[in-house]
Amino acid sequence: MKKILPVTLTVILMLFSQSCELMKMYNMTNCDFSFQRVAGISWAGIDFMKNGFDYKLLDVSTIAKCTKAIVNKDFTVNCALELKATNPGKKDAALEGFDYILYYGNDKIGDGVSTNTTKIVVPAKGGATTIPMSFRVNFADLLDIKHPVQSGEKMVNIIRDISKMGDGNTPFVVKLRPHFRVGNSIVNGPYFTIRDN
C-alpha cells in the first residue's frame, strides 16, 4: 500500500502537468496576433532595409551582386519579421514554436518557422509577447518568362509590401501552425489564419 501511493501520486502529477500544458496550448488559440515590424529583408547579400528599395540608387557592387544572383538563378529573398501575440484570457498561453505558410493575396509565396530559442509564453490579462519569425520567398516560382515586365513589377510590389508589413494595409495572409510539447514529444496543432489588414 505504501508503494502504490507514491506511484499513484506521480501519475496524478504527470496528468496534471500535461493538462496544464494542454490548457496553455488551448489558450494560445484565443490570443490575438498582429504583424509588428519587419526586421530585415535581404537578397543576394544585399540588405534592403539598409539600402532601400529604389533601384536607381544601387551602386556598382550591389548591381554586381544582383547580376551574380540572377546568373546563379538565386531568386530567394530572406525576411525577418516580428509577430505580436496578445492574450486577453485569464490564464497564460504557451507554445514551443510554429511553422507557417505565407500568401500574397491568393498566391502562396513562401514559408518559414519561428526563430524563438525558448518556449513562447504570452501572459494572461492582456499580456503581450513579440515572437521573431523568418521566411523566404522564392521569386523563381513567380516569374513568368512570357510576361517579364509584369513579373518584375509584381516582385518589386511584393518586396515593397513586405517592408510595410505591420502597417495593417498589405495583402499578406499567414497560415500559422503552432507546435506544442506533450510529454517528450512536439505535436503540431491546427493551422489558423492571420491577416495584415
Image (cartoon, grey):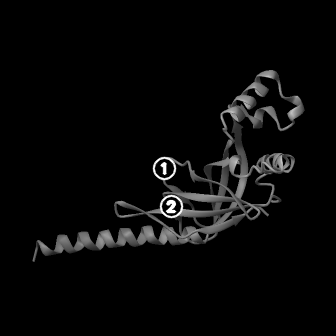
- Which residue ends up furthest to the bottom in the rendered image? 1
Q: Is residue 83 above or below residue 183?
A: above
Residue tagged 1: 118
In this orientation, which residue lies closer to the viewer: 15 or 49? 49
Looking at the picture, how far across and down is residue 43, in whole percent?
Answer: 70, 37
The outermost residue toward the right is 56
Q: Which image quadrant for residue 79?
A: top right
Out of 154 and 105, give the one closest to the viewer. 154
Q: Secondary structure at mark 1?
A: loop
Residue at 76 percent across and 53 percent down: it is: 165
Residue at 81% across, 58% down: 170
Q: Position of residue 111 (x, y in %)?
A: 61, 54
| Residue placed most toward the observer, 25 or 133 | 133
Q: Which residue is mark 2?
A: 95
Q: Nearer the viewer, residue 195 or 54?
A: 54
User: Residue 84 at what x, y percent from top left?
Assistant: 66, 57
